[in-house]
């Protein structure tokens, strides 16, 4: 049975006051600049675009490979311009795929962009466990294509959006983002003329597409049950506008080769959020709408660490922005790993990998497990519950 559930503001369930920063002050570095957003149709990319429009960017390049989502954010920004927000900015939607190396290079060279916010990634953990080659091909090699193009064409600032799932990763998605962080640290060494390459890591955002808020709302609307993986499952949360305003500020104050972490307060238990949303919707948890525990999905752990002990986060002079001690790979280690991964993801006659290894999930997992102890240990520990594979 369908029930009437009211729309819930993510702020209702955040459990703390979101940080607010003056966009005018923190976005001054973007005024008159050409800004390029990858994954511009996604939850983070589209909110960055909204804030950038009001922040005085001269040109906004909305890059993504989903035409519907790019169409939507393009249309929304043009409506905002009609209302007087950033009406002088030129908005340029670009449909493209960063896995296409030549096209990525062409686009970066022809847009003459000053700043890149790199949000594009496949991000759904269980889905990427089912499609691990796609995760590495898109997230790692796509990011490398973007970085190569940005170094070649003198992009001034490059900000990678990262995730707490990159810390001692236990999923292919987490490994892919950890490798992106390592790539940033490597490419920062190639940056010239005061250009700056950095990453910003944070946890879950409330209300993003495919996240728990819309999922729970839908389950309540359908009469329940609301499904939670595990009673002890906890996550750090921010609202999308909060995360984006902090990312934009970091992009301005961040220095080359720096690793940043957004301070997200204390973790929230997922079951508490489920109970809260049920009550906000006018029902009693476990009585009107049941909560069912379904067990962790592949690649999920109960608690996500935000940093490795050796990263030792330090406060900066900016509220809610912490700086991490870098933990780079050597160029040689990264090069060797990419050489092993490339033929699995990117076929071609010049590869020396047997045809049976191209797109081979098992071979990819074995390469990643050899490289990342946390992944190997997690897979070994959960092999029984996930039936092996």
Image: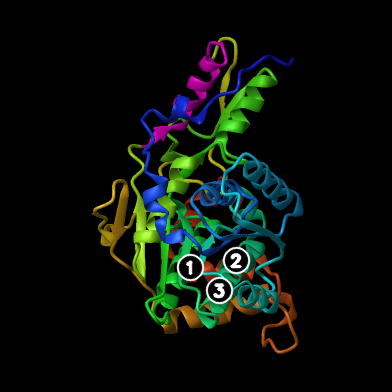
Label whose residue precedes the other's in the sequence (1 or 3): 3
Q: Secondary structure at mark 2?
A: helix
- 271, 160: nearer the viewer: 160
Give yes or no for residue 42 being in the magenta stretch.
no
Quarter of the rendering containing residue 349: bottom right
Mark 1 sits on what residue?
Answer: 179
Q: Determine whether label 1 and label 2 are within 8 Å by CB.
A: yes
Q: Position of residue 311 (x, y in %)?
A: 29, 61
Name the disc covering residue 59, or none.
none
Please give the name of the residue rendered at 55% of the width and 24% of the height, measured from the top-left corner.
Answer: 8
Name the disc covering residue 136, or none.
2
Q: Determine whether label 2 and label 3 are within 8 Å by CB.
A: no
The answer to whether any part of residue 91 appears in the image is yes
Q: Position of residue 20 (x, y in %)?
A: 38, 39
Quadrant of the drawing holding the C terminus: bottom right
Q: Secondary structure at mark 1?
A: helix
- 267, 49: nearer the viewer: 49
Mark 3 sits on what residue?
Answer: 144
């Amino acid at each position: 049975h369908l029930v009437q559930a009211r729309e819930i503001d993510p702020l209702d369930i955040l459990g703390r006051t979101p940080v607010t920063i003056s966009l005018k002050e923190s976005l001054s570095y973007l005024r008159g600049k050409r800004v390029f957003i990858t994954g511009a149709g996604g939850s983070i990319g589209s909110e960055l675009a909204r804030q950038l429009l009001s922040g005085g960017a001269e040109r906004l390049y909305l890059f993504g490979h989903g035409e519907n989502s790019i169409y939507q954010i393009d249309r929304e920004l043009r409506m905002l311009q009609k209302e007087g927000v950033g009406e002088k900015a030129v908005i340029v939607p670009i449909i493209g795929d960063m896995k296409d190396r030549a096209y990525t290079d062409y686009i970066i060279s022809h847009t003459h962009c000053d700043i890149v916010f790199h949000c594009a990634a496949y991000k759904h953990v269980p889905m990427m466990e089912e499609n691990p080659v796609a995760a590495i091909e898109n997230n790692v090699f796509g990011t490398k294509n973007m970085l190569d193009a940005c170094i070649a064409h003198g992009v001034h600032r490059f900000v990678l959006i990262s995730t707490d799932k990159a810390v001692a990763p236990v999923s292919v998605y987490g490994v892919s983002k950890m490798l992106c962080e390592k790539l940033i640290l490597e490419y920062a060494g190639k940056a010239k003329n005061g250009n700056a390459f950095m990453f910003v890591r944070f946890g879950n955002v409330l209300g993003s597409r495919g996240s728990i808020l819309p999922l729970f709302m839908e389950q309540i609307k359908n009469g329940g049950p609301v499904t939670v993986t595990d009673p002890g499952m906890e996550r750090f949360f921010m609202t999308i506008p909060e995360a984006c305003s902090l990312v934009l500020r970091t992009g301005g104050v961040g220095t080359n080769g720096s690793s940043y972490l957004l301070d997200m307060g204390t973790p929230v238990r997922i079951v508490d959020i489920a109970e809260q949303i049920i009550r906000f919707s006018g029902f009693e948890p476990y009585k009107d709408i049941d909560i069912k525990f379904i067990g962790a999905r592949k690649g999920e752990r109960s608690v996500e660490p935000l940093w490795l002990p050796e990263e030792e986060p330090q406060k900066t002079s900016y509220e809610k922005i912490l700086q991490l001690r870098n933990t780079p790979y050597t160029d040689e280690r990264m090069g060797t790993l990419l050489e092993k991964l490339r033929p699995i993801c990117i076929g071609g006659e010049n590869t020396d990998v047997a045809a049976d290894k191209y797109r081979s999930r098992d071979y990819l997992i074995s390469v990643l497990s050899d490289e990342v102890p946390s992944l190997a240990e997690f897979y070994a520990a959960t092999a029984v519950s996930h039936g092996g594979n």
